[in-house]
């Protein structure tokens, strides 16, 4: 996990983002416990309250559940919801691409051509 | 994040001096976290820590330890209250002619749960033992090494609460970093049952280990809260000089220079800044602290 001190994104957000990615990608599996807040704080050299806040975000998003005295475990991922999350991410990224294409004065056709090209490279 | 269990509960604690009065109405120190006590020189940090540590007993009011033991019950050996508290003070309380080895021997006699192995390990890690360190007298140690020695004796005990008065002041940057790690390790080992409370002026150095903050000014608590909550309550604002006059009254604390201004605004007042071109950032604990202390100082 790489935490940036001056990125403008709060540390707790960066931690939550990192775990979210691991959970959504399946790297962290259902029922698996996240590191305890105090051991994570120790490893990352940050305060306990910062890690706690990160875990609270994951809990609010329904990705993890906190158990008093035991810590946080990864929730079962609703495949429907998971797909929805991934779709949203694709949409977001495509939106960014469209924005960049506009700045570069790329036409819609040229952008589609580029996407087709990249897809064929990816498949081969 | 407002609710928490307390390791220390303070109620109407007062201690009067000729020209100073400590007066803490109600203050809870959260269990399982690191709490920083922040305030100007003479704000009452040391007096408060001495009352909490039991090195000063001539105060009025109530201190509840570990959520259950009040006043006299602290002294009942069956409750192990004193045994569960580690304390370090800036001047130290080892006799000047004791050697480092003797300090270890004496602590072993004084404290039931003192690990000499851990003490030796800590002294080694902190570099007190270089040369013939064991034979050095307390009076021969530098200020930094004397503080390290005291920290070694405190961390070598099995405790549930560490009270540290200005532990960072005499320490070099490397050792401050090490102390932060030691505190985090201590909290981790306690699994939510161990707590640390320290006073400090080195807010930036300690920010990454601080969970909860208590701000003292002239003997009174003027602000307190979890750092992450304070960082939402206070917002760092930067703007152009000509815009300042219109919004000055909405700012909590502000400093200006020839080109612009910078200051702290309460999040609840942000809407009063609407329409003005400003940058909004999350302040560091240091920036929050300066604003709070300055605001209280200027009331004088």
Image (cartoon, coloured by chain):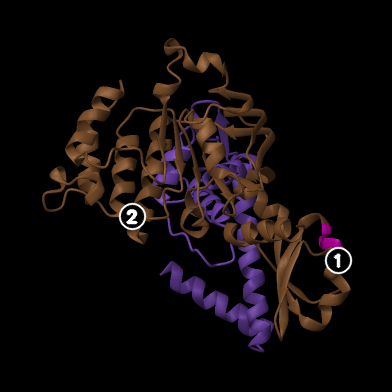
Q: In which image quadrant can residue B6 be found?
A: top right
Tell me if I can see residue B189 in this picture: yes
Q: Residue at x 50, y 18 (%)?
A: B74
Mark 1 vs 2, N-terminal side = 2
Q: Quadrant of the C terminus of chain B?
A: bottom right
Badge 2 marks a residue whose secondary structure is helix
Side of B117 where B214 appears, left or right: right
Q: Residue at x 63, y 69 (%)?
A: A94
Q: Quadrant of the N terminus of chain B?
A: top right
**Vertical side of A6 occupied by B219: above or below:** above
> Circle 2: is it few (<14), some (14-19), or many (20+) Cα within 10 Å?
some
Frontmost residue, B31 versus B282: B31
Q: Position of residue B235 (x, y in %)?
A: 71, 61
For label 1, the residue is B249
Q: Position of residue B176 (x, y in %)?
A: 38, 54
Chain B on-screen colour: brown
For label 2, the residue is B175
Is residue B29 part of the magenta span, yes or no? Answer: no
Q: Are marks 1 and 2 in contact (CB under 8 Å)?
A: no
Side of B167 where A61 appears, left or right: right
Side of B215 where B264 appears, left or right: right
Badge 1 marks a residue whose secondary structure is helix
**Vertical side of B283 occupied by B238: above or below:** below
Q: Residue at x 44, y 74 (%)?
A: A121
Q: Residue at x 56, y 80 (%)?
A: A114
Chain painted purple: A
Q: Position of residue A99 (x, y in %)?
A: 67, 77
Bounds of the magenta segment? B269-273
């Amino acid at each position: 996990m790489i935490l940036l001190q001056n990125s403008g994104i709060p540390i707790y957000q960066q931690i939550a983002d990192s775990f979210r990615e691991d959970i959504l990608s399946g790297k962290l599996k259902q029922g698996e416990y996240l590191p305890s807040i105090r051991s994570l704080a120790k490893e990352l050299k940050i305060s306990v309250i910062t890690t706690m806040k990160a875990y609270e975000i994951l809990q609010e998003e329904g990705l993890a559940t906190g158990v008093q005295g035991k810590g946080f475990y990864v929730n079962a991922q609703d495949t429907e919801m998971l797909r929805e999350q991934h779709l949203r991410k694709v949409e977001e990224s495509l939106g960014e691409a469209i924005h960049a294409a506009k700045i570069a004065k790329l036409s819609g056709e040229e952008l589609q051509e580029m996407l087709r090209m990249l897809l064929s490279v990816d498949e081969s | 994040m407002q609710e928490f269990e307390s390791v220390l509960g303070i109620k109407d604690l007062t201690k009067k001096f000729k020209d100073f009065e400590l007066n803490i109405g109600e203050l809870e120190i959260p269990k399982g976290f690191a709490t920083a006590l922040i305030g100007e020189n003479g704000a009452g940090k040391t007096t408060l820590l001495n009352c909490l540590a039991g090195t000063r007993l001539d105060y009025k009011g109530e201190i509840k330890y570990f959520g259950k033991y009040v006043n006299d019950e602290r002294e009942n050996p069956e409750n192990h209250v004193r045994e569960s508290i580690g304390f370090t003070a800036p001047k130290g309380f080892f006799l000047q002619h004791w050697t480092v080895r003797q300090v270890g021997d004496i602590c072993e006699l004084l404290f039931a749960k003192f690990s000499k192995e851990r003490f030796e390990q800590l002294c080694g890690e902190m570099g007190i033992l270089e040369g013939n360190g064991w034979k050095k007298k307390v009076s021969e140690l530098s200020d930094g090494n004397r503080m390290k020695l005291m920290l070694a004796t405190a961390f070598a005990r099995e405790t549930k609460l560490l009270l540290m008065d200005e532990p960072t002041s005499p320490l070099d940057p490397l050792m401050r970093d090490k102390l932060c790690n030691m505190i985090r390790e201590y909290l981790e080992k306690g699994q939510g049952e161990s707590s640390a409370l320290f006073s400090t002026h080195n807010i930036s150095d300690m920010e990454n280990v601080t969970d909860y903050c208590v701000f003292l000014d002239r003997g009174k608590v003027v602000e307190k809260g979890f750092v992450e909550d304070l960082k939402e309550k206070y917002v760092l604002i930067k703007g152009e000089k000509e815009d300042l006059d219109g919004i000055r009254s909405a700012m909590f604390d502000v400093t200006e220079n020839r080109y612009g201004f910078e200051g702290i605004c309460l999040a609840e007042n942000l809407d009063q800044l609407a329409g003005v071109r400003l940058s909004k950032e999350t302040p560091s604990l240091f920036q929050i602290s300066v604003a709070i202390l300055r605001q209280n100082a200027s009331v004088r």
